Image: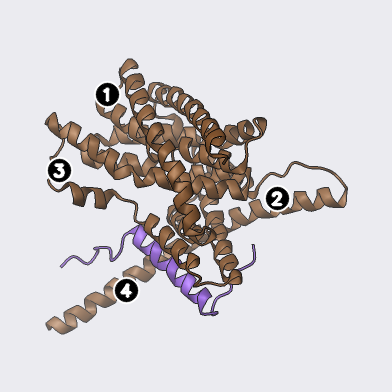
Amino acid sequence: MPTNKRLLSLDGWAILLSLSLAALIRLGVLKAIPW
Amino acid sequence: MTQENYSVGQSQATSEGFFAQAFALIPGLLLLAVVGYAGKFIEQSIARYGKAHHLTLPNIEYVLWAILIGVIISNTIGVPRVFRAGVATYEFWLKVGIILMGARFVLADVLKLSGVSLLLVLVELLLALSFMTYLGRGFKLSPKLVSLLAVGSSVCGVSAIIATQGAIDADEEDSSVAIAAILLLGAISLVFFPLIGHALHMSDHAYGLWTGLAVDNTAEATAAGAIYSDAAGKFAVVAKTCRNALIGFVVLGYALYWSSKGQASTVTNKGAFLWQKFPKFVLGFLLLSLLVSVGLFNKTQVVALGNLSRWAFLLTFAGVGLRTSFRELGKQGLRPFLVGAIGEIAIAGITLGLVVIADRQFHL
């Protein structure tokens, strides 16, 4: 059974991380560091 | 060992491997953050000094400082092995930055901007592909290297070259020569594009559109736009993303051409091929823009998302500098570089003309 098969592509991880961050901001859990 | 124990053991090993890999990224990520923040610190320090001493100093964006510091490190002491895995994540941060940037656009604006950009991208594609092919043949480069250079300079740099290399069964050496030429020219464009933009007093929109059309690699196109201004960086991303979205069609065209000559594998399912080559992060950008457009986020949250996007780009730009090694790029021979350089200058000139015409027609 292949163990090193990637769960998601780089684009998939980027989308997942971005949407998770957006959800945390929407829920008020995360406040982005001011630019 | 029972099947269950085997599975548990295997999943422990996999998770250990995952954590070991994630841990190996930390030094490089810290280096990206330090170099990027140093660029921001220099920009702010110059602005503060000018304000305190009532001097009008040129506002050089942090992007250029971050890239410059990275280039100096990379070309003097070099990037030690322990940092390399983390530094290589800069492309991931580029994608995260672009997706989060979707929050800074209302979907209607994206569609309007993309309409103009797509029109110009199609003209640019046709001209760039024909010109580079003609030029490469004139310089007697190998036919597959000509294809790689044409795709790299017309669509989207490194990822397009890698996608095409697999699709047309090109040599790895041809591929690395084409990538080196595109990266070296991208680095040079970071200096010349802003100078030309300022000399011609281009608007943020027109300049951003131009860099998105003419600079080949997405990281360099975003950086060249952001060096000019934050707004120009936004427009550069939209134009470049439109170019990236067409990658599948161009690569498919070349794959069919080379397979018809019996020099590449045949493409059985064209739809699956197009989907496989399509840059999926574009969908993330559109989705976030849609969510903001329907009012899911309030104004403060939209600003927070925009700021996160800028922090992701800060890591990207540091990585652009740190991975630029002129010694490595210079090893690839003069002829491909010359073809690339002549082609890029011509494409930059043509796209500048296109943008000027579009500016008059559509009032960018």
- Tell me the subunit letter for badge 2: B
The colour chain A appears in is purple
Q: Residues within 10 Å of mark 4 (few under 14, many from 20)?
A: few
- The residue positioned farthest toward the front in the image shown: B361
How far apart, in angstroms, are the residues tagged by discs 1 and 4?
Answer: 45 Å
Question: Where does the N terminus of chain B fall, quadrant-wise?
Answer: bottom left
Residue B4 lies in quadrant: bottom left
How far apart, in angstroms, are the residues tagged by discs 4 and 3?
Answer: 37 Å
- B199 displayed left or right of B133: right
- Tell me the subunit letter for badge 1: B
**Secondary-structure class at tag 1:** loop
Residue at image coords 46%, 37%: B213
**Secondary-structure class at tag 3:** loop
Residue B43: assigned label: 2
Residue contact between numbered discs 2 and 1, judged by CB atoms under 8 Å: no
User: Which of the two discs, 3 and 2, labels the residue nearer the N terminus?
Assistant: 2
Which residue is disc 4 drawn over?
B15
Residue B333: assigned label: none
* Residue B296: % across, % down: 49, 73
How far apart, in angstroms, are the residues tagged by discs 4 and 2?
Answer: 41 Å
- B45 displayed left or right of B194: right
Q: How many marks?
A: 4
Q: Residues within 10 Å of mark 1 (few under 14, many from 20)?
A: few
- Tell me the subunit letter for badge 4: B
Which residue is disc 1 drawn over?
B142
Q: Is residue B229 above or below residue B294?
A: above
Residue at image coords 21%, 48%: B273
Question: Where does the C terminus of chain B fall, quadrant-wise?
Answer: top right
* Residue A22: % across, % down: 48, 70
The colour chain B appears in is brown
